[in-house]
Image (cartoon, rainbow, N blue to C red):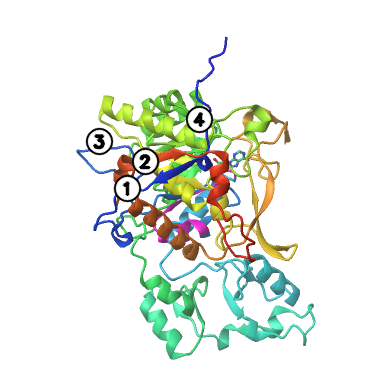
Amino acid sequence: MAKIFDEESRTFNEYLLIPNLTTEDCQPHKVDLSAPLVRFRKGHEESRLKINVPLTSAVMQAVSGSKLAIALSRSGGLSFIYVSQSIESQADMVAQVKKYKAGIVVSDTNLTQHDRLSDVLDIKRATGHSTVSVTDDGSSHGKLVGLVTSRDYRVSRISPETKVSEFMTPLSQLITAREGITLSEANDIIWEHKINQLPIVDDKGHLVGLVFRKDYEQHKDNPLELLDHSKRLIAAAGINTRDYQQRVPALVEAGADAVCIDSSDGFSVWQKETLQWVKQHYPELPVGAGNVVDAEGFRYLADAGADFVKVGIGGGSICITREQKGIGCGQATAVMNVAHARDRYFEETGIYVPICSDGGIVYDYHMSLALAMGADFMMLGRYFARFDESPTRMMLVNGSYVKEYWGEGSNRARNWQRYEMGEKAGHMAFEEGVDSYVPYAGPLKVNLDTTLAKIKATMCACGATSIPMFQEKARLVRVSPTSIVEGGAHDVITKESERRP
Ligand code: IMP
């Protein structure tokens, strides 16, 4: 007879925090949100890789490309670049993060001079950027030929068929700077020549990137930026249990600082084999594993050498695993069960293996709950998919701006390695994820700052100034369905508001 667990599994929505005494120390600017990413001997040493804010972005095509990875690492979190792509293109994305120089942006809006005004309008719509670099081959590092900004054309006056070469500002009239220039020198040129953007080129005239006037202030001050010993941004990537022997060397070569095995069900011998291979060949490379939802799954991966373990099955916003396979567990229960297992493992072995709550975070306060319940950090997909920096298209649907967001188990992602059980030559037997839209929310940094402010305020209310202290002190209460109704605006006629999760 099957084992039936006594307790129902529960979600974040079913809990609230009870405040503790807020002391003088509990002020948002004093709160430390750093979190360990790699197993360590707690009490004797520090984790050798820490993130400065406890947020990572999901290993998903619609979320973690190099642009989001750069923005998140600059803000102190970490992206795991998606694995459902060729080894070469994933390694290239990692390399772009490692090559990133603060303030010098790789141009993602590029055309050739033979393209047309209609192409300019299309690409502007797709990327949301108004500066188009014109290169000989239309790539971000091709030979610079000119630049198109909105000052160069009037849509009402010229035909959509007009060639870019006829209205662009040609190289001969552009101010450019050579690779190697410092950001403050670039900024001096921008001010001196009253320009809004400065293309940086190498000695052969190939475009390296652009420096924008508006970015400068932001780039000056990023105290939480996640940097390696050579002051390059930290970069991480997803891997699978199939081609790791080829993929991991390419990722390491590209500069990856950490990897994570990406699977909806991590309690498997393949994860153990993958962990052991990585540990044997790249003992210095942090490697996470998952996902699991219980103590047994955690123990298995911790014993196999995982540096951190991801928790969550079926809670993702685009996930239909529970409906399709009947597998999963309410996310709050999963986090608490695995957190207990992690603490027991620490008592037994002296080794602390960080855990990551992955999926199912809807409101910002869910992040505080996940931390209070024992997660060291979190992984989010939907949250990051809404931002300018996610790799998907922005669209106007029913009068509102949205971004596309699809699951790695959807037909659209065709991620054969992750959902291998339903695989048949050429197509999957069933999907585990949906294709959807999420409301567009603007730039990552602005949203993240608000989210972090909320988490810090919650921690202060609970008398804590660090995540470990929060976990020790937090007091949680279960809420009844009627008290959930009481928690929102109720019994009033609300005016239209812009409240977002
Ligand atoms: P979200 O933050 O609620 O959107 O959840 C993101 C998480 O959902 C990811 O980190 C994955 O663990 C999980 N996920 C991604 N794609 C799929 C899918 O197609 N099916 C099931 N789970 C998925």
Among the two numbered marks 4 and 3 on one chain, the one whose residue lies closer to the N terminus: 3
Which image quadrant for residue 281? top left
| CA separation in Å, label 3 and label 1 | 29 Å
Is residue 499 shown left or right of residue 465? right
Marks 4 & 2, CB-CB < 8 Å contact = no
Q: Which quadrant is home to the N terminus?
A: top right
Ligand 1 quadrant? top right
Q: How crowded is mark 2: few (under 14 residues within 10 Å), some or many (20 or more)?
A: some
Looking at the picture, how far across and down is residue 24, in whole percent? 24, 58
Q: Is mark 3 on a helix, strand or loop?
A: loop
Where does label 1 land, which residue?
20
Q: Range of the magenta residues?
A: 68-84
Among the two numbered marks 3 and 2 on one chain, the one whose residue lies closer to the N terminus: 3
Where does label 4 land, which residue?
266
Marks 2 & 1, CB-CB < 8 Å contact = yes
Among the two numbered marks 1 and 4 on one chain, the one whose residue lies closer to the N terminus: 1
Residue visible at 53% across and 65% down in the picture: 443
Where does label 3 land, which residue?
41
Which image quadrant for residue 223? bottom left
Amino acid carrying label 4: it is Gly
Amino acid carrying label 2: it is Arg
Q: Which quadrant is home to the C terminus?
A: bottom right
Among the two numbered marks 4 and 2 on one chain, the one whose residue lies closer to the N terminus: 4
Q: Does 433 sit above or below residue 166? A: above
Which image quadrant for residue 103? bottom left
Q: What element carries label 2?
A: strand
Q: Does 224 sit above or below residue 267? A: below
